[in-house]
Image (cartoon, rainbow, N blue to C red):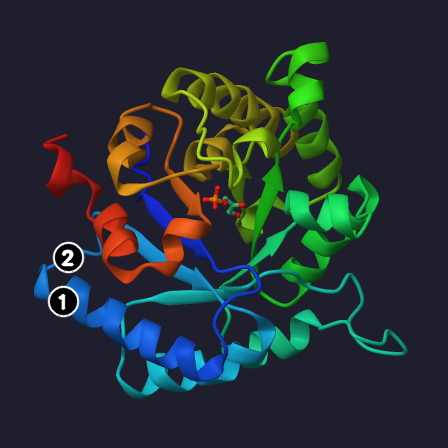
Amino acid sequence: MAVKRTPFIAGNWKMNLDHLQAIAFVQKLAWSLADAKHDFAEAEVAVFPPFTDLRSVQTLVSADSLPIGYGAQDVSAHDSGAFTGEISGAFLAKLDCRYAIIGHSERRTLHGESDTEVNAKVKAAHRHGIVPVVCVGETADDLEAHGPSAVPVAQLRAALDGVDGSRGIVVAYEPVWAIGSGQAATPAQAEQVAAALRSVIAELLGDDVAEATRVLYGGSVKAANIASFLREPNVDGALVGGASLDIDEFSSIVRFKKHVGA
Ligand SMILES: O=C(CO)COP(=O)(O)O
C-alpha cells in the first residue's frame, strides 16, 4: 500500500541570523503560519539555524509549543573527544534537534568533506536519534560530463553504506549549479533525479524505506516555483536557502498549495 509522505519544507539558513534574530524570526514565522491557518499535516516545516542559535530556538519552540521543527546544519562523525570546533550529535540531541543536514555541497566543496565522512556523519546522527538530511548533487561540469543522475546517485550510495534505514532519513537533491544562482532545475529534471535516488534507497534499504523516505529538491526554490516541484511524484518537499530568510516568502513556500492553485 502506498505510504502518504508528508511534504517537508526545510529552511537552511546557512551562516545567517544570530540567536536574537533567530528568536524573532521563528516567532514571526509561527505567527504568519497561524494567521494563514496552515495545516501542518499538509506540510511539515523545519528551520536549520547556525549552531549558536539552537538553544534559543529550542527554548522558544518548547515554551510556546510551536509546531516548527529545527535541526543543525552539520554534525560531527565523532561523539566526543579532541575534535576542536566540532559539535557532537549527543549535544544536538540534548537540544531536541530532530534533524541534521549532512553533506551539503558547501561542506563538501569548502571543507573538503568526502563521501566517507558523510557516511560516518549519517551513522553518527542515527546513534543519537537524529534524522539526517543527506544532501547530494552534481556540479555544472558533472552535469555536462555524466548527465544529471550519476553523481547524486553515487554520492547517495556512499552516504547510505551500512546505514540502518529504520532510523529514518531525508534526502535532498541539490544541483550545485542551481544553489544561489536563481536558476532552478526544471521540475522534470528534479523528478528524474529524485526517482533515481529513490531507487538507490530501495536497493540499499528496502522498498518500505524507499516508499517512506522524503526526497527534497533544493536550489533557487521560491514561492513562485515551489508548486511545480511538489507536483512531481518523487519530490516530497524542498530544502530552501536564500528564500528561507524572508518570512513572507518562506511562509508562502510552506503554503505552496494556496498561492498557485495547485
Ligand atoms: O543550498 C541550498 C539549501 O541548502 C539552496 O540554496 P538557495 O535556495 O539559496 O539556492
Relative placement, left or right, of 177 versus 44 is right
- Which mark identifies residue 62? none
Which residue is label 1 attached to? 34
Vertically, is 11 above or below 172? Answer: below
Q: Check the picture and name the quadrant holding the N terminus.
A: top left
Hey, what amino acid is under mark 2?
His
Dot 2 and dot 1 residues touching (CB under 8 Å): yes
Provide residue 192's location: percent of width, then percent of height: 48, 16
Query: Of the numbered discs in the image, which one, if any, rests on residue 38?
Result: 2
Vertical order, 249 against 24 (above or below): above
Disc 2, SS: loop
| Residue at the image position 44 percent from the left and 66 percent from the top | 70
Where residue 10 sits: x, y (%)? 41, 52
In the image, taking residue 148 as reference, residue 88 lies left or right, namely right
| Above or below, 35 relative to 144 | below
**Residue at the limit of the structure toward the front, as seen here:** 181
Picture quarter containing residue 232? Answer: top left
- Between 246 and 32, the residue placed more toward the observer is 246
Determine whether the residue tagged by mark 1 lies in a helix, strand or loop.
helix
Local crowd at mark 1 within 10 Å, few (<14), some, or many (≥20)?
few
Label 2 to label 1: alpha-carbon separation:
6 Å
